[in-house]
Amino acid sequence: MAMSLSLIVLPLLAILPSSYASPKPMLGTGSSSLVENYKQTFLTSPNSDFSCGFYEVGGNAFSFSIWFTNTIEKTVVWSANPKSPVNGHGSMVLLNHGGNLVLTDVNGTVTWDSKTGSGKGTTVVLLDTGNLIIKDSNGAVLWESFSSPTDTLLPFQPLTKATMLVSGYYSLYFDNDNVLRLMYDGPDISSIYWPSADYSVFESGRTNYNSSRIAVLDAEGYFLSSDGLNVKSSDWGTQIKRRLTIDYDGNLRMYSLNASSGNWIISWVAIAKMCDVHGLCGQNGICQSLPSFHCSCPPGHEMIDPQIWNKGCQPQFSKTCNNTEEFEFIKLPKTDFYGFDLSYNQSISLEECKKICLDACSCSAFMYKVGPALCYTKAVLFNGYSYPSFPGDNYIKLPKNLGITTSLVSRKSQLTCNRDIPEIVEGYASMYGMNRVDKNWTTYYVFAAILGALVLLFTGTSWWFLSSKQYILKSMEAGYRMVTSQFRMFTHRELREATGKFKEEIGRGGSGIVYRGVLDDK
């Protein structure tokens, strides 16, 4: 009886689909997997570090993906169809008899394929490195997932001029100048934010002379790029699972796996200040990272969607250019909207800067730095941020009939954009680092009056003392003449040689530019 039962069971096992069998590192033509069996993996690497199969990205939506096996939650490192998930019923992945790996939706529509066709003997293999490859009967690699990354690089997976990492509106790629960059490519604007455009390629520690355009993460935690970028994880060393990922928030991070807990630890990050990432708060939005990251709206604006911050803020007024007297400026301390400047002016007053913006219909705001007297007028307000250490203030142009005053701005509380609360709590000042304090103006006036009286008394006493002295001590006069006699005029040629052809600028002021130089001792 036992012999008969064995004879029955063995044929049944032979006809079971491959998706029901135990995970394998390699499958041949005709192998397939249905989305309904997504809890069973399609392939597993020999070392069991990686698995491949259907991954649930949402309700009734799946991608064909590769993920780390031994983590608390599945950490996807590659997806065939990140932007076009397939249905949770009837979808299938198949290595057909022509040697093409095909992902089809419920209606049979091809969502993705490897575009390979070597016929019989083709195999699909998941390697220990996490690389999914398709080989012909001679073992030649026809296609590999390492050549088409999504948002993650694994150790020894190269990033080249033909590939990029993409996460939402953000991408890591090699620019035409051979420099590895992070870019925000949103529905309205595109802008590069790493390395910062405020510095040259060389000031950023990069070079654009190497045109090979390749970057690689190694197993020890070094990320090396042909443009001179050389970074190291905080826990560099062997025997640690690593990945380099461009996250949904636009930051590039290196992660290390804690093998005992199954959790990921950030071991390097490209951008320390979150608000230096562009596009996080959308058009007109202002990013703040202290005490925690959040987005706010400037006066006269409201959130388009409090649940989705990167949609930005919309104005509560219609923009017109009829009469400049209908507008006023509201100061936003320590705030700027990076880029998209209409004009740049230096050595001008705040009032002159205001007039320039008032006279320009397309000017929405301007940023002013008091010390160097710099004026940047803005056409559109993107990449807004507020830092306590920022050395400038933003002045936003608003209609006077909105009734927003500087004192109102300084008294209202912070605009809170809690993802769990659909309402917007209005208020403006404290989002720029200003304290909410009711000031007692009477005290200030009394103090100012006393201070003024003391100044007048001191001035009168000094005048009387000086007027009563009709002479200057001869020793002081002689000393003064001796010092002043040591100064002389220098020719342009002498100054040019002393400063090394005016090589190093150390400051600017009302009298002009100041350069560092060394004079001959003679």
Image (cartoon, helix red, strand yellow):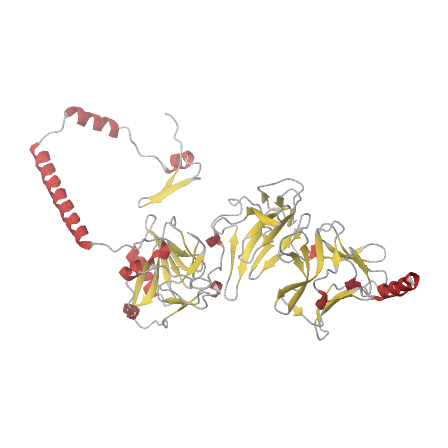
* 439 on left or right of 77: left
Can you say which quadrant of the picture contains the N terminus? Answer: bottom right
Q: Is residue 4 left or right of residue 143?
A: right
**Do we see residue 375 in this rendering?**
no
Give coordinates of residue 416: x percent, y percent.
Answer: 40, 61
Q: Nearer the viewer, residue 392 or 36?
A: 36
User: Most extreme residue toward the front, as rendered?
Assistant: 1
Please, which residue is most extreme toward the bottom here? 107
Name the residue: 40% across, 56% down.
Answer: 336
Q: Is residue 305 visible?
A: yes
The image shows residue 406, relative to residue 201, as above or below, that is below
Residue depicted at x 58% and y 47%: 265
Residue at coordinates 38% horizontally, 36% vertically from top-left? 495
| Residue 513 sits in quarter | top left
249, 453: nearer the viewer = 249
- Residue 21, image x, y percentages: 79, 61
Q: Which residue is located at x 23 percent, y 26 percent?
A: 482
Q: Nearer the viewer, residue 383 or 237?
A: 237
Image quarter in which the C terminus is found? top left
Position in image of residue 487 (x %, y %): 29, 31
